[in-house]
Amino acid sequence: MQLIWLRSDLRQHDNTALAAAAARGPTVAVYLLSPQQWLEHDDAPCKVDFWLRNLQQLSKSLGALNIPLLIRSAEHWDQAPAELLKLCQQLQIDAVHVNEEYGVHESRRDALVAETLKAEGIDFYSYLDQLLFKPGTVLTKTGTYFQVFSQFRKVCYERLHRSMPALVKAPGKQAALKLASDPIPDAVKGFATPSEALRTLWPAGEKEAQRRLDTFADAQIDYYQSERDFPAKPGTSQLSAYLAAGVISPRQCLHAALQSNQGEFESGKVGAVTWINELLWREFYKHILVGYPRVSRHRAFRPETEALAWRDAPDELAAWQEARTGLPIIDAAMRQLLETGWMHNRLRMVVAMFLTKNLLIDWREGERFFMRHLIDGDLAANNGGWQWSASTGTDSAPYFRIFNPLSQSEKFDSEGLFIKHWLPQLAGLNKKEIHNPANLGGLFGVADYPSPIVNLSASRERALAAFKNLPSRAATGGADE
């Protein structure tokens, strides 16, 4: 008997470990509920709810193949080896199959489980699945992990030209086992159930993920490059939550993009090429997690930036978290995050730069807050994005490159449509006034909208000074963007 231990791979199709288990014999699936570990990892309540809803869908589709899905508890991953061993012994399991996960805690957990099972004569197999390339196989000429995305991408393209990762065939129906699936809980302790409105935005299941991918590849991918930076437009695929939970695979995404682009990676439709690059950014940050494990231990990728004199400003941090900074594009973006569990990617950069540069608050505060609210929260991508914006990370923005939230707002939400949607109290302002209501002065200002909590130009100078004072930083000038 084979056991597939499901984690961030909640799908039946193109699932490497599931297909491998089923090919070897009768298969049972298990999922471990680990609420204590999830709390330690700052997983968002809406994300945990999304996992549970996807498990309910997966349980039905596996049930149609006579593969029971069992639910077990390991509050903390330290308990996973004993819990899985007990299950294996009860069911007389010959081998456990998993898809590789990355990050310090995940790697340690899997190594301990493998060791515990092998000591009892139970095989443990792990497979490359949530990435296109195994970490450690895309390296510089000197054998180190890449630190610059453009160089990493070039090698990935060369490899993809030589051999495309194939889709894995879904398993067929097996003979029925004398074992029933467990009910999937609707909630777990420590995680509140999100609003019905939020859940409606993110329906669970592979069918929905595939529908989004098909719609995007058929209709929107052509406009992706030109529209993805405009938060009021439906220019993005809305697949990130499904990728993070493994409800769809990067291979499925890559195949769909190539199909829409006549099989081309680097030429043809600029929208398809841009989106493939985004898949490779996701890949890059996971490789960074493995190659430079300090980033999963809350350390800056650039060690010299650990000396930055971040400000302790709890009131300003709270104003940022609660969408009351007095800068409409920042507050609208934070409102979107709080209400939907998601934020448009351009705005993730804008609000991150505002926190780390204009407020000079430690990027780790922002990283943690995002993880606690994002339905697509992913350690590698979230950390990579925050460190990029804070100029502490790999391939990061030069420290003097500081987004001006007002010019970003005018450029990417010129009509103020996004702002008006999330901040209805500003709906009466025209497209010139809406980006900076403070310009109207107290008499004409919006009654229930706050004044800006910070002076943008003075705070920019403060950030430049803090970065210039770092050891090993050459003082260089720079410009707003």
Image (cartoon, rainbow, N blue to C red):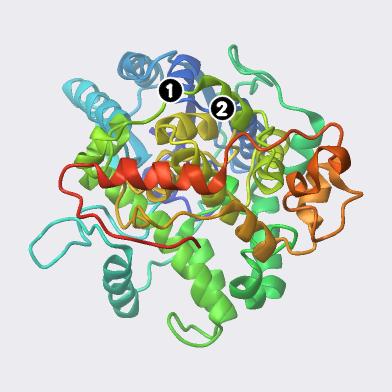
Please give the label number shown on residue 397. Answer: none
Residue position for label 2: 316
* Secondary structure beneath label 2: helix
Mark 2 nearby-residue class (10 Å; few <14, some 14–19, many ≥20): some
Residue 318 visible, this angle: yes
Instruction: Identify the residue under disc 1.
Output: 312
Name the one closer to the observer, 405 or 65. Answer: 405
Query: Which quarter of the rendering shows the N terminus?
Result: top left
The percent coordinates of residue 31 (x first, y second) are 49, 27
Residue found at the very far right of the displayed protein: 428
Q: Residue at x 44, y 80 (%)?
A: 265
Left or right placement of residue 355 versus residue 199 in this view: left
User: Percent x, y for residue 378?
Assistant: 47, 40
Q: Residues within 10 Å of mark 1 (few under 14, many from 20)?
A: few
Q: What amino acid is found at the position of numbered circle 2 in the picture?
A: Glu
Q: Is residue 28 at all visible to an observer of this figure?
A: no
346 versus 80 height, above or below: below
